Image: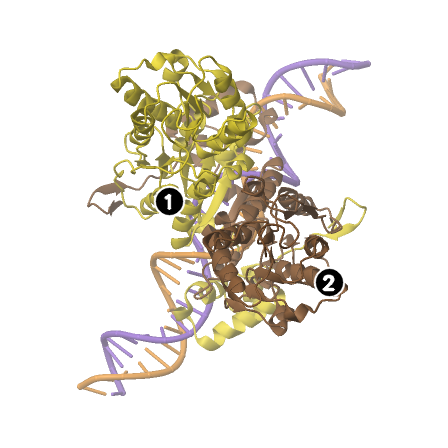
Chain colours: A brown, B yellow, C purple, D orange
Amino acid sequence: MLHVGVNGRKKKAIRRATIKEVAAEVGVSAATVSNAYNRPDQLSPQLRERVFAAARRLGYAGPDPVARGLRRGRSGAVGVVYADPLSYAFADPAAVMFLEGVSQAAEEAGLGLLLVPAPLREGRNPKAVGEAAVDGFVIYCLAEDDPLVDLALERRIPVVLVEQPPREGVPSVEMDDVGGARAAAEHLLGLGHERLGVVSFELGRDARGGLADLERQREATYRPSRLRLEGYRAAVEETGLAWGEIPVYEATGNAPEQGDIAAGVLLAREPSPTAILALSDQLALGVFEAAKKRGLSVPEDLSVVGFDDVPEASRTDPPLTTVYQPHVEKGLVAGRMLVAQLRGEEPQSPAPLPTRLVIRGSTAPPGAGRDE
Amino acid sequence: MLHVGVNGRKKKAIRRATIKEVAAEVGVSAATVSNAYNRPDQLSPQLRERVFAAARRLGYAGPDPVARGLRRGRSGAVGVVYADPLSYAFADPAAVMFLEGVSQAAEEAGLGLLLVPAPLREGRNPKAVGEAAVDGFVIYCLAEDDPLVDLALERRIPVVLVEQPPREGVPSVEMDDVGGARAAAEHLLGLGHERLGVVSFELGRDARGGLADLERQREATYRPSRLRLEGYRAAVEETGLAWGEIPVYEATGNAPEQGDIAAGVLLAREPSPTAILALSDQLALGVFEAAKKRGLSVPEDLSVVGFDDVPEASRTDPPLTTVYQPHVEKGLVAGRMLVAQLRGEEPQSPAPLPTRLVIRGSTAPPGAGRDE
DNA sequence: ACGATTTAGTAAATCGTTTAAGTAAGAGAC
DNA sequence: GTCTCTTACTTAAACGATTTACTAAATCGT
């Protein structure tokens, strides 16, 4: 069988040897070859060696993983479903840290980690979730109303929900987003700031970009967005300020560039905010950028608080005050809960993982610098 | 069938419905149900609807991916083999960007991306490569002498090598590491620096940490390390300086902390270097740290050049002079070459991808600042 | 009304393993 | 010498789908 390649070259389609051919070569049954690989105690060492020798001769690299998976009833991989195109996931340090945790859990269990492509919003191919050869799913970062969640659940394989509304019988891991956000806002308020601005990433799957009114905030289907906003709000209202007067800019993504744009809009308003709360460090980085462009120095002219405490946060100038969140642990916990389910155990959902305000140099009392 | 869970709870093992059961429920053959999912044109729309209805009733979520994979002869995923434990991969922004590219290529082809766990050096479980249900491998960041490379090749599935010595019949993608490194060193030399220091990540699988002599440098089995060192060397010798006198510190990893330690050692030598070449931006970040600790300002007292041009490089203070390398494109190209092979095409290995020196603020003539 | 074509569906082989159950031969106990 | 255990294999049935080749019925042109 020949194929014609891109450059006209032909390529022989390699036929891989099977367990049967190896068996025939050695003169034993297929079961014995299988045992040579899977249960060495079932045959004599000499025969085992002969099997391996024959395998080498035939270019047989061991049992086919797919066939084995079918027979054994599992595929040896856990899937992570991520809302955005796969490649966006990697662009966000927080998501990467989460994956790091999941991968660690997978590794512990000798499982592979399959990143499930959840293609672009339009032309979304939900089949990816249905066609992924995995033993379970970790659902991360999907909107509460994303059909992919149900699709995954319908597969009837173990699932762990991350930052999703809890569902009966499905373990989930949550973060104390409200508490962290609240602490961040309280910190600013305690410093004396009264004119706040908020830079948010997507609130719902139909991110529009622009100021988000209360209605839009309430409807937010991305859990972390809604929860963090709630936390800010609680702190603000506790101080007696009106939450409704604080501009919340909904960016269409989570990159520094978007934070830059968002902060630009906020800063252009009258009166302009003396402090900005960003829903992520990536966005906060963009706020720094926006401030610099306008000749505003942080924290003298503008205080900035992020969320996530990614590694870079401690290296910025000034270091970013932010809300620490155990990203890696979150992934690790989710991954381990999935593994536990695969073992037939029924893990309990842990209490929301703690967040913690980390005060660095990007926040100060308003007007601390120039003659503001 | 019942299992006892961690907390004593029991969990029913869910038996998923099969295509046969759905067929029986509808009163048709299994083939027809299969067609309902895979070739809608083979049956009447009404029957198709009845099939789906029955599937819903029975909780059948569509053909089992593993069984389908077996029959079709492919698994629908590409594997990425990475040397370090999986979780380290994510800690390095450059690796993450590479993965981003691969994932994009996979996504284009409707394939999943399987991260293959290549456990710790000791107790390394090479079976992971043999047991991964993938249609092909992208080999990334492995030492030239890593047995995993052969193991992957033995599977007789398409493989793409990244930054590996070329092998007959195996497409590979390479970077112009030599050129980039050379440009970096020439830049420093051109500025007038004569006392250079180099901070490298692992040279071989047995990274020892400490100054690496010429012998050790020559033996380096991590290709990027060796190539970059070669580039520096070429520039240095061209200027008439003796490469052998330039201290090269081999760190045991690629995190900023390791760069900090390495730079500490270099800076403590007499005479101390006026400029440091780091093999990665991550390490360069650590060099910044080390300089700060010692009251050295960059670039006045110490010039620093990185390698990779990760996003953070443009945001540091001062912005990092570094060598740009198209990480995402590298992954994309590798991924697409793998996909091409899966289609039976025989892709040609492209010319080494270009690198480019990006001069920012971390380099200046020696003694440009204080009275050095 | 005839043969040719199309449509809608089926039967059965097959993908490459694993594993439960079975067997034959040799070892040890008495 | 018989009986029971091991040891070292083998047989054959899954695992859950896809696909090729085939058939029966409906449709069509003339």
* Position in image of residue B274 (x %, y %): 41, 22
Report if the CB atoms under discs 1 and 2 are less than 8 Å apart: no
* Position in image of residue B321 (x %, y %): 39, 35
Q: Which residue is mark 2?
A: A234
Spatial CA distance of label 1 from label 2 is 47 Å
Q: Is residue A62 left or right of residue B18?
A: left
Q: Dividing the picture into quarters, in which one does residue A311 lie?
A: top right
* Position in image of residue B107 (x %, y %): 42, 53
**For residue B241, above or below residue A316:** above
Name which residue type carries label 2.
Answer: Ala
Give whichever of A346, A284 is nearer the camera. A284
Q: Which residue is mark 1?
A: B335
**For residue B65, above or below residue B92:** below
User: Few, some or many C-alpha atoms within 10 Å of disc 2 (few <14, some 14-19, many ≥20)?
Assistant: some
- The answer to whether one can see residue A36 in this image is no
Name which residue type carries label 1.
Answer: Gly
Residue name at image x 75 percent, y 63 percent: A239
Q: Is residue B275 left or right of residue A336?
A: left
Give whichever of A135, B221 is nearer the camera. B221
